[in-house]
Image (cartoon, rainbow, N blue to C red):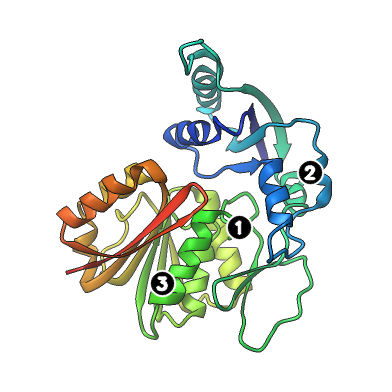
Amino acid sequence: MKWVEVQIKTTTEAEELVTNIMYDLGVTGLAIEDPNDILAFQQSEEDWDFIDPELVKQDYEGVIIKAYFPEDDNLNKKIELVRENIEVIPQNERGKKLGEVTVTEVYEEDWAEAWKKYYKPVRIGERIVIKPTWEEYEKNEDELIIELDPGMAFGTGTHETTMMCIEALESYVKDGHKLFDIGCGSGILSIVAAKLGAEKVIGVDIDSTCVKVSQENIRMNEVEDLIEIRQGNLLDVVHEKAHIIVANIIAEVIIEMTDYVPDYLYDGGIFIASGIILEKVDRVRKKLEDKGFKILEIKYLGQWALIASALE
């Protein structure tokens, strides 16, 4: 299958704004290359050989943000919107554009190979290890191994928002729980929930590619008897109730969802919401409280936040 890679060269200062614009345009996931992040990670105490050192040597000193679109009838319109927002509309008083946009065709198998230089085994939380299918890893006794091949879906476990969700699932998932994973991407959070003891997990994604990749990863982890993946928008295809709903999306969608999430939770059920940029934390928190949720915790990692709340 042929895809198009839309690459945006921008600055560290403009990274968050560009990211928000892309999500507003309907992009479901982004790959972000920032040499500063790579260097900082290499200097951390938990260096897991996570990034290929050659990535640090890239010629461009700023940030490179990549989005992937399937070739379809709406492709040209999407690319025009990206160019208009990034290259045409001035973003400050000096009229400076946000970045430079380039478009490249890419085949799915080439894209999948390119991912491998970024993606190494990483331990998250107390005992979850996300392991690419092509990597060797010696399991410790207490660890839960999640085998993952993201394919053309997004969700490798390495983004701050996903890492916080995994840590939250470790805290809140109990044996016998039913859980909904809204915007399931590669299926990583659904698989983590099943491995942690959830009795039934329903993952939902509007993107058919994410549905396909999720199902493949679920079979690979041998939890297909516990997880069902449905294609649809948010909770539109869910007709049950759950003990936990996790949504790793964006603040605006979480705010919208909060109006009807209570209808899908058992009394005392937990809503784990991630993908919230820092300046929108208060808006999301207030909306949750207005809808009868008690805030359990707010976690921060980098420029992102997660809010876990319980329905009172």
Task: Identify the disc placed on residue 2.
Answer: none
For label 2, the SS is helix
Q: Measured from the top left, where is residue 193 in percent x and y?
A: 46, 74
Q: Viewed as shown, does residue 123 lie left or right of 214? A: right
Quadrant in which the N terminus is drawn: top right
Residue type beneath disc 3: Val
Task: Identify the disc placed on residue 56.
Answer: 2
At horizontal 29% and vertical 53% (from top left) the residue drawn is 236
* Earlier sequence position, callout 3 versus callout 1: 1
At horizontal 21% and vertical 50% (from top left) the residue drawn is 287
Q: Which residue is mark 1?
A: 158
For label 3, the SS is strand
Residue type beneath disc 2: Val
Task: Identify the disc placed on residue 201.
Answer: 3
Quadrant in which the C terminus is drawn: bottom left
Q: Viewed as shown, does residue 281 lie left or right of 77? A: left
Which of 101/26 is in front? 101
